[in-house]
Image: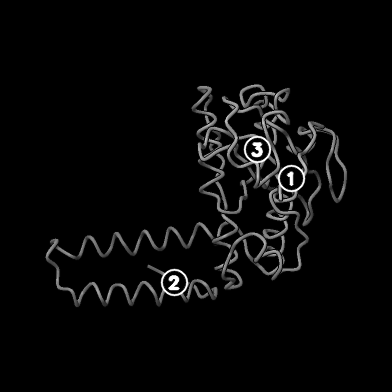
Amino acid sequence: MPRTPLTHDPANSRVDTVGSTAATSRALGTFVAIDFETASARHDSACAVGVAACCSGRVVLSRTYLIRPPTGQFTFTDVHGLDWEAVRSAPTFAELWPTLRAWIAGAAFVAAHNASFDRSVLHACCARYRLPPPRTGFVCTVQLARAQWGIRPTKLPDVCRRLGIPLRHHDAEADAVACARIVLAAETDGWRPGKHRARRRTTRAIVRVARSTAGSRSADRRYWKSFQHLLRTWWRRLRHGITVRL
């Protein structure tokens, strides 16, 4: 059944500790979680965005903003309950961008569940209105849930169920808050963003070593099998916090 549409009320928020503005989030937030809802399969058709700022191990401010997409074509209404009438009077992404940019500007990183989607929506909307996209790095809580706890499947309801996090799915703010709490749970268990980046750097370094020693495209298959085994072994060691030096 269609969800009850959100009303365009920027002051409406569900938070652990209530703040007043996005500037407060920028001052307090160690990181920001974000969740976009789109009107259609077009990534520049964002119709809502939820943001949640986190500091000192909790969500300190969260908010939903409705967005008027470039066209009135809505094919995902049955997913999030929003239609053209719900967003007709909402600001465009370009009009909302200064506010959204203020949330992101002070964040150490942006968290999103399936970050490749939310990042592509953000960049597509920026491109649509010829706005420079933010350079803040993303942390994907899908990958985080797999690496930190071995959770599969990793859809947001599955991860929240495993971690005991309440969720009202496809409500942009609720999804952003849930994503933030996944990161907070991982931080409680010892995860840090630097570890996430170090794993990627180590993997790239291994690939560079392999390419430099392969010699040609016709390298012995036995070599590549050994390399793949080495990569899997080192990746398991990294997942369990064992230091690997190159």
Q: Residue at x 57, y 52 (%)?
A: 139
Contact flag, marks 2 and 1 (Cβ < 8 Å): no
Tell me: 62 left or right of 240.
right
Camera-nearest residue between 117 and 83 = 83
Q: Quadrant location of residue 214? A: bottom left
Which circle marks residue 244 in the picture? none
Give, as a three-letter code, the residue at label 3.
Ile
Give, as a three-letter code, the residue at label 2.
Trp
Q: Residue 127, image x and y in percent? A: 49, 28
Secondary structure type for disc 2: helix
Q: Residue 205, image x and y in percent? A: 35, 60
Which is nearer the N-term, disc 3 or disc 2? 3
Task: Report which residue position mark 1 lands on.
Answer: 173
How far separated are the C-alphas under marks 2 and 1?
A: 34 Å
Which circle marks residue 104 in the picture? 3
Please tell me whether mark 2 or mark 1 is closer to you in this view: 1
Q: Residue 54, image x and y in percent? A: 75, 49
Task: Report which residue position mark 2 lands on.
Answer: 235
